Image (spheres, rainbow, N blue to C red):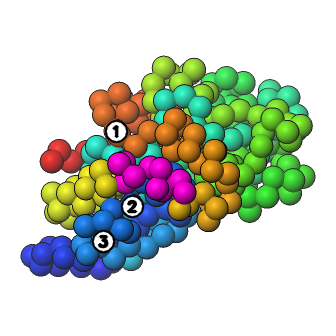
Amino acid sequence: MRNWELEQPLSKIRIGAVSYLNTVPLVWGMLHGPQREKVDLSFSIPSVCALEIEEGTIQAGLAPVAEVARQGLAVVPGVGIACRGPVRSILLFSRVPWREVRTLAADRSSRTSVHLARVILRERYGVEPQIAQHEPILPEMLSAADAALLIGDPALRADPEQLGFDWLDLGAEWLALTGLPMVFAVWAAKPGLPLESLSAITHGSYQFGKGRLGEIVESEHAAHRVTRELAERYLRHHIQFEIGAKEEEGMRAFRELANLAKPALVART
């Protein structure tokens, strides 16, 4: 475990972000705005980002809420990755009727979404499948298991209406089940890191990106291999970046339904 050396100013805080399209507005200021001089920014998939926080490779990161609970991390409130209804990038497919699902192939990068899939399958269909990690290649996943979970950019590249399988958008399913927003990831760090500095960076970076969504779509859609139209719709209508009281209520409900033992420590700044 690395020492934080908290007595020193955080002139270059090591921050980890997720390499999906939905993260880009949150880190646009860290990439192109005034916050870029304050961070050493790296990118990975969600599960790796969580591991890097745990191991001390990074000081703070965009952590899956399931990992926030497991590690007992302190949350910087205000911004993150959430939805209030269909999210489009968390898709569950099945080649058998939902009540017959016994095995689930899950994208290796997923943590929170696996717990969400378990909750939806249990609460709606009364099944609790065995889960195995798999590369996010849908035909291979469905040859190995009854159902498959795609998240992030691989889910965006799939056209669920054209694939011929039953499918669920887990953002929509969560809203139907609870009436609450679903929060997938938040900025978090181990307790003890000065959060005022981190909050100024994360909020400032998002505000810089919020006013430049058109620029982000033009710059990033091809790199993430999605159409301009889908990227625009996704960032403006499916993903919600601001985390308020309702979103925090949704996180509490998710922890309870997913049986995540440790509560998140929410820091007020």
* Residue 187 within the segment the image draws in magenta: no
**In the depicted structure, whether residue 221 falls above or below residue 257:** below
Q: On the image, numbered disc 1 is attached to which residue? A: 243
Q: Tag 3 or tag 2, which sits nearer the N-term?
A: 2
The crowd level at tag 2 (other Cα within 10 Å; few <14, some 14-19, many 20+) is: many
Q: Position of residue 200 (x, y in %)?
A: 20, 57
Label drawn at residue 153: none
Q: Position of residue 183 (x, y in %)?
A: 45, 40
* Residue type indicated by callout 1: Ile
How many angstroms separate mark 2 from mark 1 (CA)? 18 Å
**In the depicted structure, whether residue 234 falls above or below residue 26:** above
* Front one among 116 and 76: 76
Q: Tag 3 or tag 1, which sits nearer the N-term?
A: 3
Which segment did they paint magenta?
209-218
Question: Viewer-nearest of labels 1 and 3?
Answer: 3
Label drawn at residue 28: 2
Q: Tag 1 or tag 2, which sits nearer the N-term?
A: 2
**In the depicted structure, whether residue 217 falls above or below residue 257:** below
Which SS type dominates the magenta stretch? Answer: helix
Question: Viewer-nearest of labels 2 and 1?
Answer: 2
Badge 2 marks a residue whose secondary structure is helix
Q: Position of residue 236 (x, y in %)?
A: 49, 39
Tally the marks.
3
How many angstroms separate mark 1 from mark 3 (CA)? 23 Å
* Residue type indicated by callout 2: Trp
Q: Which residue appears at 72% of the width and 24% of the height?
A: 125
Badge 1 marks a residue whose secondary structure is loop
* Front one among 124 and 91: 91
